[in-house]
Image (cartoon, grey):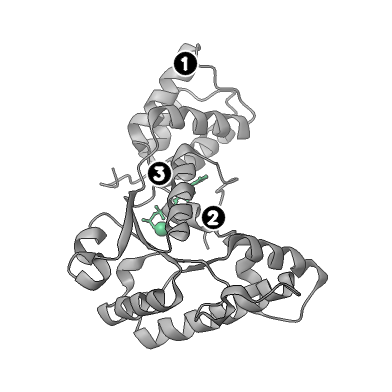
Amino acid sequence: MIRHHAGPFIVTREHRRFVEFADAVRRHATIGLCHGRAGVGKTLSARSYAQWDLVEPLLTEWGPREPSDAKVYAALAKTRTLFYTPPVSTSMTTVRKDLSLLVTRVNICINDKLKNRPPGRWTAPLGRIELLIVDEAERLTTPTLEFLRDQFDRAQIGLVLIGMPGIEKRMSRYPQLYSRIGFSHEYPTLSKDEMHFVLTRHWKRLGLELDKEDFTDTRAANAIIRLTNGNFRLLQRLFMQIERIIRINELAMITEDVVDAAGQALVIGNAK
Ligand SMILES: Nc1ncnc2c1ncn2[C@@H]1O[C@H](COP(=O)(O)OP(=O)(O)OP(=O)(O)O)[C@@H](O)[C@H]1O
Ligand SMILES: [Mg+2]
């Protein structure tokens, strides 16, 4: 995954709402549809929920065991979540293979952690997994969606499908799947309040302090809000430029001019 300069994951209100949504989908063993514009933070929220940065390397490499793997087993035993991104223009065979491999490996990890516990739902097709999150769900073909629905019916686990706005409409063309959707969650752009919270963190990262009472800071913050419109990816990219401009000019504060210059270095396009 590409995360240059991405900085630490910020627990925003939007992320907490995603967590509530995913928990509800899992609890009710239903299908949840999560949709939102490009760059609002859907993928990062889901990966964080599934602790995927921690568990993915072990699951994909599957090399010799190391003592440090114990924390991965513990994480999976706790999250019980499988996060999957189908490759572009993929066939059902690939998805089946990918998923079956991941399901087996995740279950081996969970069982390692739980050792002597009774098997519980282990007889179910997906074992001890309680939630499957499929990112970029628009990449799935109709037969693959049908396959997932079938798996989901038999395993009685939660299924979260993440996609762009409009995915709901596409799903509505498959009544069998659509009628099973228990929750639909729109992942929104950052609210203004939340932007201030995130901006404070960014200022701090550059060794600065964002003062709400300060005229220059407020102007700069408003310019950023205006340029990015609460879009996390744009914000991240804009800050890369801000950082660069601050460094080369040896500036001690972020001004509106700095933000404007940074904005010009970006192709913002119509991502708003
Ligand atoms: N909670 C967060 N904390 C810190 N940075 C974040 C957070 N959420 C998103 N970002 C930043 O925004 C970028 C875009 O987020 P993400 O890839 O999750 O968006 P997305 O909604 O999945 O977009 P797409 O629809 O294009 O897949 C990330 O690469 C990261 O830089
Ligand atoms: Mg994404």
Q: Secondary structure at mark 2?
A: helix
Mark toward the start of the polypeptide (3 vs 2): 2
Q: Secondary structure at mark 3?
A: helix
Which residue: 49% across, 49% down? 19
Which residue is at the front of the view, 210 or 238?
210
State if disc 2 and disc 3 touch (CB < 8 Å). no
Rendered location of residue 112, percent (x, y):
73, 75
Structural crowding at the residue carrying mark 3, measured as other residues with C-alpha within 10 Å and reported as few (<14), some (14–19) or many (≥20)? many
What residue would you read off at disc 3?
A: 234
State if disc 1 and disc 2 touch (CB < 8 Å). no
Q: Nearer the viewer, mark 2 or mark 1?
A: 2
Label 3 to label 2, Cα distance in Å?
22 Å
In the rendered structure, which amino acid carries the disc numbered 1? Thr
Rendered location of residue 256, percent (x, y):
42, 23
Position of 235 with respect to 10 (left or right) is left
Structural crowding at the residue carrying mark 2, measured as other residues with C-alpha within 10 Å and reported as few (<14), some (14–19) or many (≥20)? many
Residue 43 occupies which quadrant of the picture?
bottom left
Q: Secondary structure at mark 1?
A: helix
Q: Which of the labelled discs sits on residue 216, or is there none? A: 1
In the rendered structure, which amino acid carries the disc numbered 3? Leu
* 173 relative to 91, above or below: above
Rendered location of residue 12, percent (x, y):
50, 39
